[in-house]
Image (spheres, rainbow, N blue to C red):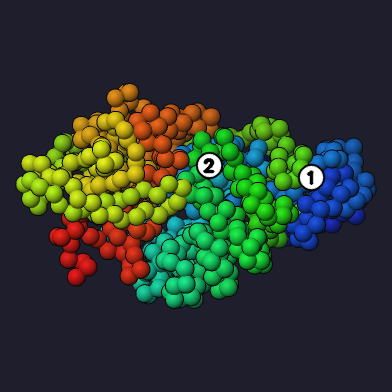
């Protein structure tokens, strides 16, 4: 689909004649922002009494007097008493985690001062393959955002022996996608870090295809600090990583020449700890970036996006200008596009935000994207044609059979008594889980959920090919205090059907409803049934931002009423099938342990497991 945006971002080379003519005053600026305090992220200064002249989509002149560029048709924005800063950039973001389309995501974040980002659509890629990636790229090109897409590196995140996905990428797919245009910026987070370290041909081939295309490769390394394998990983040409949870993690990556991305998502709050690499260790901040990774529509509505992350970093003791650098210039430099975005300099694209009050408050009151005023006082003032997804992407939930009670039973090795089992323990506000060993009571040869011990069943059903593959295990930390269940087709990263509950009948009911509505989230409890339809690949809604946020909030309320009070529970639970983040997860292929020695399947029953022998 070839849809042209009204927010054009032509190459600098094509704009040089009119930019130079405007800077001389021979041609008049299309827009002037006059008399504000410039947040100069290049020099690290705050410069009062500055003005900016824009020609088309790019900045022609920056100085104290731009009167020579003003003509009778020049639009003038008075900025006295306001700050003028480069538009915020998200250096690592999965748009699908908002459950919004790219269009609605843009409408949500532009009023917050976010004018661009580097997006890894590996959620839709795991469901629809290159078709899904291309759809999101095409949609992004219609918006005002400086949207750069990455090719998902891990489709699947590991291999078919550990999980089943809807598609598969290798070096050929990576090379093809990187030829789609300069806004295909590189390779998305390489989550199969053991594959890189130990020389997996597919992973090495994908990185080689990326580097040969002159693009950048992003990382995802979750082995512990001071691990000898991080330098091996870096040697592959991976130059950025967002899996930093301690200041030592940040330091180790920067010392190896990598960019350390400090994450503040909806359900994982790492900045307060990782920012200490700057505030306490005193490390140079040039290779530190602020990112979101995953934020829900609820979080966008009530907290914000990159504006929230910058505010949070400042609250931890980071100087405001430094925090802005971490969310603008550093990010642009990391991806090699600092000539175009990330600062307010002559020749750059005019992605500019105006802020009122103290800079530390990050109170964005106007957003200019590609030289056009697109948002003011928290509201969009620009519009563009909508993007229509084809019908086939609305039909991606294919179990191939009806579910029954037998699908949720866990057969035990004994008829009665107690047996030791592995249980997934949820970690609130962090991406990791913990493996705990518990003795569970067996009745009639079955393992059952035990609300008294906060012990739920967790099941994953393959939903892409109708293979019937599924697995059932146990999880604790969900918090249900009454009979309840949740079913969802958002289950990182394979996005199979994930069902969690302490009552088999409610689990069946929730799962069947999620399938019937072609994907989404369903919570069933004594209080009733709450639905959140996500028909686009089983991941996203075509509804407007406000409606999606309201539906997401209704799921949160339903979970809370059932006793699950985890912060951003939906996002936290959706990661329980992600078999590349320690310590233990469940896929349709079974329980998977992610440890220092690699990734392997294990048995639910401890004494049955032979993988540790």
Quarter containing the C terminus: bottom left
Measured Cα–Cα span from mark 1 to mark 2: 28 Å
Q: Is residue 178 above or below residue 254?
A: above
Q: Position of residue 84 (x, y in %)?
A: 78, 46
The answer to whether 219 appears left or right of 524 in the picture is right
Residue at disc 1, secondary structure: strand
Q: Residues within 10 Å of mark 1 (few under 14, many from 20)?
A: many
* Residue lying at 25% horizontally and 38% vertically, measured from the top left: 452
Is residue 475 left or right of 297 when viewed as pictured? left
Depth check, mark 1 against mark 2: the one in front is: 1
Image vertical order of residue 111 relative to residue 475, above or below: above
Residue 63 image point, x, y percent:
88, 53
Element assignment for label 2? helix
User: What percent of the width, then of the height, locates residue 265?
Assistant: 52, 47
Relative to the observer, which residue lies in front, 116 or 212?
116
Residue lying farthest to the top in this orientation: 527
Return the residue at label 1.
83
Query: Image height check: is 466 above or below 531?
Result: below
Q: Nearer the viewer, residue 110 or 604?
A: 604
Name the residue tied to disc 2: 102
């Amino acid at each position: 689909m070839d849809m042209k945006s009204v927010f054009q971002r032509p190459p600098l080379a094509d704009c040089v004649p009119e930019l130079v003519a405007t800077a001389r005053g021979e041609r008049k600026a299309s827009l002037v922002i006059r008399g504000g305090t410039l947040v100069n992220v290049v020099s690290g200064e705050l410069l009062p009494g500055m003005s900016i002249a824009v020609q088309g989509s790019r900045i022609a002149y920056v100085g104290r007097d731009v009167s020579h560029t003003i003509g009778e048709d020049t639009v003038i924005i008075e900025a006295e008493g306001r700050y003028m800063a480069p538009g915020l950039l998200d250096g690592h973001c999965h748009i699908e985690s908002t459950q919004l389309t790219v269009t609605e995501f843009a409408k949500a974040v532009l009023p917050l001062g976010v004018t661009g980002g580097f997006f890894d659509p590996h959620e839709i890629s795991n469901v629809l393959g290159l078709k899904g990636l291309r759809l999101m790229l095409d949609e992004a090109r219609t918006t005002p955002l400086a949207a750069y897409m990455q090719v998902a590196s891990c489709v699947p995140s590991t291999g078919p022996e550990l999980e089943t996905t809807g598609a598969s990428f290798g070096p050929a797919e990576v090379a093809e996608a990187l030829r789609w245009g300069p806004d295909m910026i590189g390779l998305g987070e390489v989550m199969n870090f053991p594959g890189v370290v130990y020389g997996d041909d597919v992973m090495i081939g994908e990185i080689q295809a990326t580097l040969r295309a002159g693009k950048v490769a992003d990382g995802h390394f979750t082995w512990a600090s001071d691990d000898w394998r991080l330098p091996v990983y870096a040697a592959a040409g991976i130059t950025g990583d967002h899996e930093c949870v301690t200041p030592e993690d940040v330091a180790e990556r920067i010392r190896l020449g990598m960019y350390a991305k400090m994450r503040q998502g909806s359900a994982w709050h790492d900045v307060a700890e990782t920012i200490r690499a700057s505030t306490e260790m005193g490390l140079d901040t040039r290779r530190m970036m602020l990112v979101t990774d995953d934020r829900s529509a609820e979080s966008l509505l009530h907290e914000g996006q990159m504006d929230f992350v910058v505010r949070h970093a400042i609250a931890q003791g980071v100087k405001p200008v430094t925090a802005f650098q971490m969310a603008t210039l550093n990010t642009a430099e990391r991806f090699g596009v600092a000539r175009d975005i990330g600062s307010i300099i002559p020749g750059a694209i005019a992605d500019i935000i105006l802020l009122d009050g103290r800079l530390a408050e990050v109170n964005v009151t106007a957003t200019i994207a590609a030289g056009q005023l697109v948002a003011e006082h928290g509201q969009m003032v620009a519009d563009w044609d909508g993007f229509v997804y084809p019908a086939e992407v609305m039909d991606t939930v294919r179990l191939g059979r009806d579910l029954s009670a037998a699908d949720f039973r866990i057969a035990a090795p004994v008829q009665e008594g107690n047996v030791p089992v592995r249980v997934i323990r949820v970690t609130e506000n962090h991406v990791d889980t913990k493996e705990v060993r518990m003795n569970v009571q067996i009745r009639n040869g079955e393992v059952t959920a035990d609300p008294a011990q906060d012990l739920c069943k967790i099941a994953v059903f393959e939903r892409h090919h109708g293979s019937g593959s599924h697995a059932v295990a146990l999880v604790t930390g969900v918090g249900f205090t009454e009979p309840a269940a949740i079913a969802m087709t958002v289950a990182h990263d394979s996005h199979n059907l994930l069902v969690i509950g302490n009552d088999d009948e409610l689990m069946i009911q929730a799962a069947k409803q999620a399938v019937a509505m072609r994907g989404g989230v369903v919570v069933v409890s004594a209080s009733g049934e709450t639905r959140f339809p996500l028909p686009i690949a089983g991941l996203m809604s075509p509804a407007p931002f406000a409606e999606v946020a309201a539906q997401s909030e209704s799921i949160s309320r339903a979970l809370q009423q059932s006793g699950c009070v985890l912060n951003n529970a939906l996002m936290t639970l959706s990661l329980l099938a992600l078999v590349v983040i320690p310590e233990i997860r469940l896929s349709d292929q079974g329980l998977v342990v992610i440890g220092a020695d690699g990734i392997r399947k294990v048995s639910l029953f401890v004494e049955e497991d032979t993988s540790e022998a």
